[in-house]
Amino acid sequence: MKKRSVLIAGIVFLVMLAVILGANASGVYFAGSFWALVPPLVAIVLALITKEAYSSLFVGVVLGALMVAECSFLGTVDTVTVDAFTAAVSDNAGIFLFLVFLGIVVALVNKSGASRAFGTWAQTHIKTKTGAMLATFLLGVLIFIDDYFNCLTVGSVMAPVTDSKKISRVKLAYIIDATAAPVCMIAPVSSWAAAVSGCVDSEKYSGIELFIRAIPYNFYSILTLVFVVVIAILGYDYGKMADFEIRAEKDGDLGVLDVALNDAKEEMKLSENGPASPAKGKLHDLIIPIVLLIGFCVWGLLKNGYDSLGGKGTIIEAFSETDAFVGLPWGSILALVVIIIYLVARRVISFNEAMECIPKGFIAMVPAITILTLATSLKYMTNALDASAFVKSAMEDVSGLQFALPAIVFVVATVIAFATGTSWGTFGILIPIVSAVFPEDSALFFIGISACLAGAVCGDHCSPISDTTIMSSAGAHCNHIDHVSTQLPYAMSVAAISFVSFLLAGFFNLFGIAWLSIPIGLVCTVVFLLMMKNLQAKRQ
């Protein structure tokens, strides 16, 4: 099966290479046309076929660079090296540092034995799978400041709990992903609120005011949170997720990534050999480092924002001006130093053991850093091909369908975010277009903005090249493509309900009762899950 997938992938690449070369020879202009979305679409198709992300993303980057360089061999090599990989590493250096520091913190906590202590506590106080899933969901909701921080922190803290209840790592990754971007997109104090505010160019509303007024109609984000809670309470799964959950329950196969599995085996072996340090960690040796990490990272984000404002302004204004790529590594490195001092002073680990955790933390984050570099490089190729111009022209062609336009905006935003792997880039493209299409004195204006933001989160949630999706699988230490394939049926279910909700919102707005679409969307989500449970029971 694997050889067949590789063969299919090779054929797809060669066919696309021939098509691009032929199009270039015919004088086709790639920039600003549908061709701009071809590289990410090819990467996504290859990833789903081969179940392997690295080569798929690399192929997409090469095809994009080939079009940017107009099929020049040396130009393609230069574009891949300089405009793609070098730029991606340079621009993401802050997040890479944050990932490494977070990996080191996780390694330190594991070395101290605090993770095992937390697992023991959880086994005593969290009795059921439902309880474990709801606890994971609650922690994800509480960490609403930033999605990267959310993904990796929740995964590190809750993995021992979900493992003890035989919840597969792909299910953990789904809960993490569903409480990362969706939560940040409806939290007024978050890096996402700041990003949206920066994209708004309105004479009547400030960026943060527009963001807050759009929250009630952000159907995908709200319904995703409802979906997670209801499916946890009902206690069933469908699609590929059900297969992984059955294997976890019957065979104990949780689907843990090899790196994490090897670390767990090594820790168990050390414990059996009787070293003093891994057994000394207590529950508070996990809680205190996490609190320190959260506190310092929030401080780093606020400090960066206040520095941008010249030391003046409110907390919301500070978040609207902060740069997470600076604030997060700033806070995390301070937290790391304090955590090392704390654990060494507590004598749960020695100084030498703490230093041994540094390369371990870095190694644990290498897969995430590699995929994030490739995904960012692919995004740069899409930007260089001016995908936004193609989207703008496509949106202008349907601007006459006023009541259906929010649903259309939602679909367009979903497709762009899915193809490019970036929600921030998606609403950065679409918010100015939506603002020009809808009159600002109309309720449809806020619904349209909500549709843009909801579609951006939806496409980001579904895409295998999305940074948040990558971080979620990294946080849960599961295979990335397994996470994508198991999450997709759930995400598309919520997307379908959201599409109907946006249609209803546009239609009800004609009668001044657009708010009625909100409870209808909530009811539809619950009814859908109840119907799926009955259907699943009949099949079994």
Image (cartoon, grey):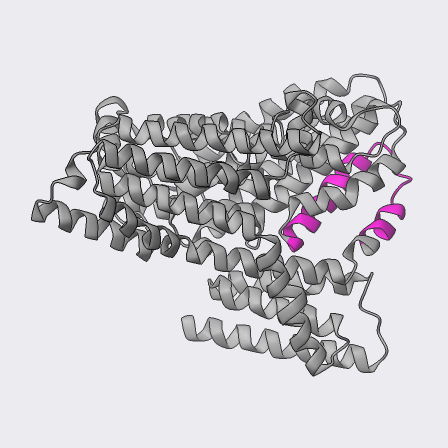
Q: Is residue 446 above or below residue 24?
A: above
Residue 405: in magenta span: yes
Which is more toward the observer, 208 or 477? 208
Left or right: residue 1 versus residue 513 is: left
**On the rendered image, what quadrant is the C terminus found in?**
top left
**Percent position (x, y) of residue 64?**
69, 68
**Percent position (x, y) of residue 386?**
79, 59
**Percent position (x, y) of residue 515?**
73, 18
Residue at 48% x, 56% y: name it: 369
Start and end of the magenta stretch?
391-420
Which is more toward the observer, 119 or 338? 338
Which is more toward the observer, 161 or 299? 299
Residue at 43% x, 28% y: name it: 139
Q: Main secondary structure of the magenta part?
A: helix
* Total numbered labels: 0
Q: Is residue 72 above or below residue 297?
A: below
Q: Is residue 51 above or below residue 179?
A: below
Quadrant location of residue 116?
A: top left
Residue 151: in magenta span: no
**On the rendered image, what quadrant is the N terminus found in?**
bottom left
